[in-house]
Amino acid sequence: MDAATQLALMTKAKLVFETEDTFLSFPVLTPFAYPPEQLNFSGPQTNFQVLAEFSRIVNQLPPGPLFQPNEEGYLWDMYDNLLLTATVANGSLTAEEAAHYQQALDVLYVTSAEGYREDSPRRRAYRQYFDAWLVAREAANAARITAESTSDPALKAQWVAAEEPAHRQKIADIEVAWETLGFRREVEEAERVERQISARSPRTLWNRWRGEFDPTTDLLTDPQSNQPFAATAFSPADAFDAPWPTFSLDASELAELGRQAPPAMSGLLDQSSDEAPLERVTFEFRSVVLVRSWFRKQLFGERFWRFGGEEQALSDGENPAQGRWPAYVTAVVFARNITQWRKPAAGASPQRVPLRALPQWRIRPELLRVPPVPTNRITPDPRVRPRGQMLVTRAISPELLATEVRAAPTFARAMAQPAATRIVSATAPASTSTSTASAATLKRLRLSSFTQVNTLPNLFPAPAEPTPPAAPAEPETSRNITVLAFICKRLPKSPDPDPSLDWSL
Amino acid sequence: MTISPGRDLQKNSNPVRATYEELRAWYQANAAQLLEQTPAKSPRTAAISKSLPLILALPPETELSDLEVRVVLFQVTGGTLNWSYWDRVRGRTAFERVATALEQAGLSKELSPAERREFRESESKLKALLPNL
């Protein structure tokens, strides 16, 4: 894929998925691709190795728009240390506040048979409708950008006359259902009460968070690499079972988005290639939210804690942010059925080429990190995790970056051989958990996930457009799920202790 | 609640005091060993080190007032002994033991401003080990 197409793709993805407090990080060196069944973390046959890989990938510190393996450690390390070392303000609830607080908790949570706190059916429904609403908005955004970028007046007219009203109606329908079937007002009010009142009894909440992350059981060990990881899945857990919206870039849109690209992004790409630009690129996409049963993002925004010592702040809250951990991956944009059309020779039809995964990006080599290669593997202490034991990339040449897509069997080897797109073999045996602790942790992870709402009509029917015959491709091509981008959430200023609270201890 | 070491009633049958005594024994038997087992750069190491003077100085519960016992247990739920949150003491975590005992006694896991003030104004020997309370 040529640099101009990649630039347009990045630009459009940013326009569709980024919000005020998020940014996209693109896995440029080792595009991650999996057969869909291997990303099924909700069933009894969870592939433990893939879960470990996925968890390590999405819990790295995202360094910016280029997602590269790094040595900054993992979110679970930082979070665990924070829970252990932070100083928490004093405070307690009145009986009236405690009762009001309990009412809110009753709306939001139930306790599982195993004693874990999980989302109540109402909050689960809320999340389902929120997810449907979000995806509908993303689909509308993608279509709008196509219509606005195209030079074809007929397509512009079709957007105004038919597509935009249809998207608006779809979103409105979901919002109505969200209000009624998704308990939107009730859940958001309970969340507001929970936030407001819990801040008056900080230690109660802090101890609840501590109670939700037991490093001795929540940190599992990858059987392959012997590295610890905190299991992280995504919701909807059944995201692969439904039609996805289509992401399309045609020639005129490619050109227009290339012009709109911020200089900071175009400066990332290696423009030296003389590869011919593509005619068109299409794929289906789906954003999914990450599920971490051990982690409460609310902590970062609370003002009732501070560091016990002189530690560097996690984030100064600015954009771009400075700090020890200024952002984390909060969602993933998956892509599938990736197809590119090459410009035809004179008189011929465009050549349709299905891809197994998004090709590697052509990044200017001087921007790539070259972290040290670990010399040995660390056996994790069950209590203290080694920081940053990510297997790392080596120097990457433009020639390597241009290497065509091919299968690479495992994460560890792929990271050591960064030229290849990492595609986990569909035939790899599912290594399931063997310990009771692992089984319990996986069950808790499943309880934290939700599935797609099934009361909505088919939101994204497959486009009925004629497709030219494809060039020969491997039969599994369209099934693979690849990561288009990681959606990263910026931290607010954190810590940001409120001086009016009682800090004596 | 006054500071009157050795004079509070029903000390031995009090679940809060019984928990204090169990935890005191556990900390004094295990803290130094845990410190050795934990990697030097771990924040847990720093936390254990910081709490060692208090642990070594913890007297038997018979020498403490109810408030002093509460103050020490508060260190488990939210203070200098909180590093042991997940450590198991006779089958249950340190936090669970304290929380359950306080709940049984109808006491809060928090120290009220009045209790803090009373402790600060007392002549407790523990004050020197908990200078920030």
Image: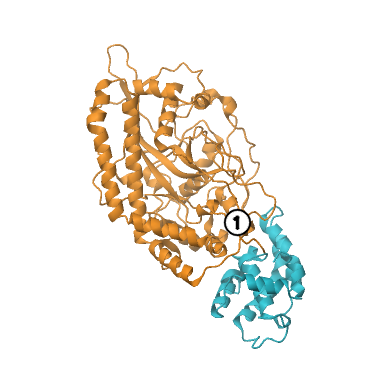
Q: Give x and y (percent) for residue A431.
A: 45, 52
What residue is rendered at 39% in x and 35% in y? A16
Observer-nearest of B133 and A389: B133
Farthest top residue? Answer: A346
What residue is rendered at 34% in x and 33% in y? A142
Q: How is the image coloured?
A: by chain
Neighbourhood count class around disc 1 (C-alpha, 10 Å): few under 14, some 14–19, many 20 upward: many
Say above or below: A142 vs A91.
Answer: above
Say above or below: A274 vs A118.
Answer: above
From the viewer's perspective, is A398 left or right of B53?
left
Look at chain A in the picture and name its colour: orange
Q: Give x and y (percent) for residue A199.
A: 53, 60
User: What secondary structure is found at the residue carrying circle 1?
Assistant: strand
Q: Give x and y (percent) for residue A439.
A: 46, 60
Q: Quadrant of the N terminus of chain A?
A: top left
Observer-nearest of A314 and A341: A314
Q: Which residue is labeled 1 in the image?
A: A305
* Residue A462 appears in the rendering: no
Name the quadrant containing residue A321.
Answer: top right
Look at chain B in the picture and name its colour: cyan
Observer-nearest of A369 and A124: A124
Name the quadrant containing residue B18.
Answer: bottom right
Residue type of the residue flagged with mark 1? Trp
Say above or below: A179 vs A286.
Answer: below
Q: Quadrant of the C terminus of chain A?
A: bottom right
Say above or below: A257 vs B15.
Answer: above
